[in-house]
Image: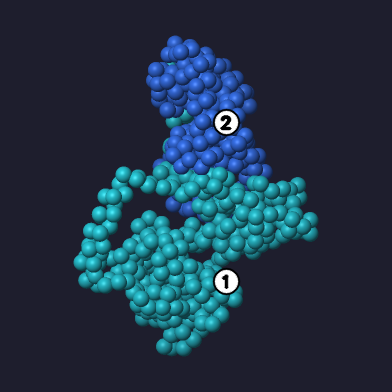
Amino acid sequence: MGRSSKRGSRVLDEQELIDRMRRGDQRAFDQFFETYAARLGAFAARRSALDAAAIEDVVQMTMINAMRSLGSFRGGSTLFTWLCQICRNLLADARRKAARQPQTQSLEQLSEEKPLAKVVQLTDFRDPLDECATDSERGAVRRAINRLPPHYARILELRFGDELTVPEIARVLQVSESAAESQLVRARQAFRTEWQGDTAVGDVT
Amino acid sequence: MSNIDDQEILRSHLRVPALSPEALARIRRATEAEWRAQTGGSPRRLWIPRAAAAAAALLALAAAWQFWVRGPGVADGEPMAQLARAEGAGIVEVRALWRDTALGVGSELRSGGDFEARGGSLLRLHGGGNVRVAPNSSFEVLSANSVRLDRGEMYVDIPPGAHADASFVAVTGAGEFRHLGTQFAIAVVNGTTRLRVREGQVQWHADGGDATLPAGTEVLIDRHMNVTHAAVESTGQQWSWTETMAPEIDIDNRPLGEFLDWFARETGRQLVIADDTTQHQIDSIRMHGSVHGLTPMQALKAVMASTSLRFDLPAGAIRVSFAGDPPTST
């Protein structure tokens, strides 16, 4: 079966899943949630610097917005891509909101938003300089990934985030193994280019 | 950057912690509630016709088992409250010599009954208001309007006007605590009673006399009746468990102002409307959809995201303003 026909059948399956959900089919909802919720969590975590509670909020809002917009899914993209687009918009809102927040917080505010135990757990036993360097590198990776075309970012996440093998990636993307392999090579090349650009800028500043 | 470098960097930064099972369960609850609200999906049914005959036979056996194993019926005194929600292992009625009886949502809690909350539980009081019981608490229902807390913590939320005929009373070894239009939390730990008054007043009656404790007061009374006073804020971590057990609000086709009042009460914050324009906006908005399964804060974010209003949370308050109007610094 060719790539386009495989994609066509997947889109049809997904459209059918959505149609069943719109008719109130509980099993369709279960399948939808089990397929996409955890993946969306990983997507949001990789594409943002938010903490676990904020990631949960974003995923929840993504799913709720998706439920409100089930009728607008037309199958022009895959269901996961559609969900990711909703999620991206919410992440962008969260970033804008964070940019408007004051950079300092009172201890009372901090303990209200993050229980003290959690703050201690996150920072304990880490050298602040190491932590700073790691955060900086993580931010550079995130920026580079966010600048890539979505299909490149996706394949890199499948390979290095979810640790799927090339045959497994081929099955997920419903393409041939050789197509998955070559797309992975191109994605890594594109990442290297973006990464080098970002770190070069970082060096200068 | 070498090939090895980029793989290592990608591996180390693209691996992210998965959402916890608890987080996924919360998300699922909220998503499913919204899905049902949008599609009218029917509640989960596990009806298997072929098992119907077998189930009928089992019912007969179960009835016999109920009679021989569970003993006499549950407490049949005055009804105080109905179990509205139970988390985790829920709530059981404890009966000496007989097997504990797990209560389902909708069960009545009647006077004469001893209960243990094994998970957080929300009780809807028949006289109005609600009581939230923390996990690992045990209590006895004394009458339609009173309860004795033996261990653990409970939060009493009785809006003004409710329980007009007879005040609700929580009893511990330290005496009786009577609501006077109130939100308060009462805890018993190792024989010490701790009372925190969030709103209104609580009248404390003990052998030594009476005292009226206003909002913002925390009192510790040990088993020797030594009393320690402190101040307590109406917001903060100490109340967060009560918010996770908040009664759900039905927002569909309801005015936004009603939701904001609910949020303010549930979170112990004062509702501040920025100006007349904002008030006009609030008055004109009716909500659609559902916030079932969401905590008050999650519900607030969900609701406000669909309006042209914004909110900020200065200490002890929620301030709502028309979008574009920057919040005052606090």
Give the percent coordinates (x, y) of residue B130.
50, 68
Query: Which chain's residue wears label 2?
Result: A
Residue sitting at 65 percent across and 53 percent down? B287
Residue A82 is tagged as 2
Near mark 1 (Cα within 10 A), the count class, few <14, some 14-19 or many ≥20, is: some
Q: Is the same chain shared between marks 2 and 1? A: no
Chain depicted in blue: A
Give the percent coordinates (x, y) of residue A149.
58, 21
Residue closer to the observer: A29 or B180: A29
Chain depicted in cyan: B
Amino acid at the residue labelled 2: Trp
Near mark 2 (Cα within 10 A), the count class, few <14, some 14-19 or many ≥20, is: some
Decide if residue A50 is in sight here: no
**Which of the 4 quarters of the picture holds residue A30?**
top left
Residue designated by label 1: B159
Query: Which chain's residue wears label 1?
Result: B
